[in-house]
Image: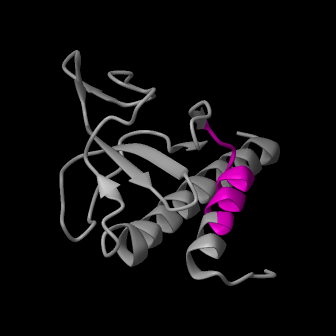
Amino acid sequence: MTNTDRTILSNMVSELATTRALLNCLIKEFALPEECLHYTWPEGMQGIAPGSFVDGGQWKGIPLTISLPNQQQFFVLVDRRDHLGSHRYLSDVYARQGQGTWRCLAFAEFARQLLTACEHMTRARHHE
């Protein structure tokens, strides 16, 4: 493995871990208390199994949809329903705004959309 390969792999792992950490914060700090989290397939993605976990030829995973007040939605497959938000993520995170198309976002775009949603929810602007 070359240094370039290691750098790319390190970036991928760190972005995945950070995405999961940000999603955990969103779920535990807002989606659960505000009842914005639902274990259902979102409209427009019914029955599609995006990059999910396969075990013995069967799709595994429970759909988790977060619908925020600014019409931002996030979707991911999880291993179980948990009222405390302790999930194992089994797929990429998908997002859409309003009735737009579901997309698997690059890390920077996911972070931007999440920050925009948080600004809307708190009515505060963050300059970080």
Q: In which quarter of the image is residue 76?
A: top left
Q: In which quarter of the image is the N terminus?
A: top right
Residue 63 position in % (x across, y down):
30, 40
Work out whether 114 lies above or below 44.
Answer: below
37 lies left or right of 74: left
| Residue 46 drawn in magenta | no
Q: What stretch is highlighted in magenta?
A: 104-116
Q: Nearer the viewer, residue 123 or 25?
A: 123
Q: Residue at x 42, y 27 (%)?
A: 45
Question: Looking at the image, which residue is at 47% across and 62% down?
Answer: 23
25 and 56: which is toward the camera: 25
Q: In this view, does 18 lie above or below 41?
A: below
Please state the horizontal and vertical placement of residue 58, each as a whole percent of the image.
Answer: 20, 19
Q: Is 108 in the magenta?
A: yes
Q: Position of residue 20 (x, y in %)?
A: 48, 59
Tell which residue pokes out farthest to the top in this image.
Answer: 57
What residue appears at the point 61 percent right and 59 percent down from the top-left corner? Answer: 14
In this rendering, the count of numbered labels is 0
Residue 81 coordinates in the image, percent (x, y): 18, 53
Quadrant of the rendering where the C terminus is positioned: bottom right
In-image side of 92 versus 65 (left or right): right
